[in-house]
Amino acid sequence: MREHALYPLAGKRVWVAGDRGLVGSALVRRLASEDCDILTSPRECIDLRSSVQVDRWVRQARPQAVFLAAAKVGGIYANNMRPGEFIYDNLMIAANVIDAARRHHVEKLMFLGSTCIYPRLAPQPMPESALLTGPLEPTNQWYAVAKIAGLKLCEAYRQQYGCDFISVMPTNLYGPGDNFDLLSSHVVPALVAKAHHAKVDRKETLVVWGSGEPLREFLFVEDAADGLVFLMKHYSSDQTINLGTGSEIRIADLVDVVARVVGFAGTICYDGSKPDGTPRKVTDVSRINALGWRAATPLEEGIRRTYAWYTEHLDLIRERERKRA
């Protein structure tokens, strides 16, 4: 990795917007070793969808660097059922935080997008240049459109105002602190929760959505946080940059890994009536690799650590699900 940072974080006031989420909480843990002053904004104190509240908070807190990790996220089911929420909430969060950062002279901001911004049939592995070259995947287009707007806002502010705002596109993330609610979670936490309940309930069959054939890439969230901090320190450009492993796995093979880790020994059945989503999605990570960063955690090790966290926090997870119900 590079030794000399373009933007050292030591001594900086660093705001992690979305610090209670999967990525935000991992960022807080990672930043603890950067000798910076970590700022967080509890949901009870600030609604990031409100421009007035965001402006007031940024004016008072005076962050010098911002990781914009806050977002409304969810899997295929949640995106299909609540498209209005996904596009509105994410548009407002991005616009409010990015504009407040500009007006209050934040030195550097990182906007976290998602590889779902790329076309459904993008070249594989997906290069950053694939953005806006084709139609989006319909099952997550609402979230994707909001994320594209956020990264374009960063690009526009860099061009017009000279803001050092950058956009990073993480691949599918998983890990400790994930959302394990079956109706709103992504594939890894959903599989972990389903396999665990199937084992505990002594079910003979584990039913998985889709055909099992799509190819996906997964990045352990602790690796993601390390990569984001690395990019904040070493990257400055109007071009988006991918963050991932560059490796892919068939969903059916992922299910086998999860079943092995959890200890479910029954039959796995695929429900082909449910959507698969994009047929293949793996990122081209040549640009970040060239800067000197690579993911460190093998998939099975990451899933083991995720499952360990899940079993240790079942009471907390049930309480979260009860509040969301």
Image (cartoon, helix red, strand yellow):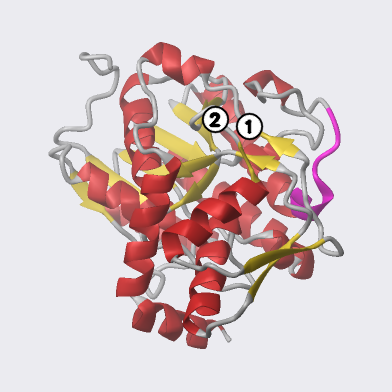
Q: Nearer the viewer, residue 216 or 126?
A: 216
Q: Is residue 17 visible?
A: no
Q: Secondary structure at mark 2?
A: loop
Q: Pointer 2: what residue?
A: 247
47 shown above or below 14: below
The image shows residue 44 at horizontal and vertical percentages of 39, 75
Residue at left 44%, top 66%? 263
Say which residue appears at 74% left-offset and 69% top-offset.
Answer: 82
* Quadrant in the picture for residue 136: top right
* Quadrant showing the C terminus: bottom right
Residue 123: x, y in percent?
A: 75, 23
Task: Identify which amino acid the numbered label 2 is placed on.
Answer: Ser
Numbered marks: total: 2
**Label 1 SS:** loop
Instruction: Please indicate whether residue 325 sits to the left or right of residue 37 in the image.
Output: right
Mark 1, residue position: 282
- Examine the rendering and report whether any part of residue 63 can be seen: yes
Residue drawn at (77%, 70%) of the image = 81
Percent x, y of residue 289 = 43, 17
Q: Which region is colored magenta?
A: 134-141
Query: Residue 275 in magenta?
Result: no
Disc 1 versus disc 2: nearer the observer: 2
Dot 2, how many residues are within 10 Å of its Cα: few (below 14), some (14-19), or many (20+)? some
Of the 4 image quadrants, the one containing the N terminus is top left
| Residue 97 image position (x, y, % from top left) | 49, 49
Decide which of tag 1 and tag 2 comes sooner along the chain. Answer: 2
Disc 1 versus disc 2: distance between alpha carbons?
A: 7 Å
In the rendered view, would you say 270 is above or below 162?
Answer: below
**Residue type at the position of mark 1:** Val
151 and 276: which is toward the camera: 276
Q: Determine whether label 1 and label 2 are within 8 Å by CB.
A: yes
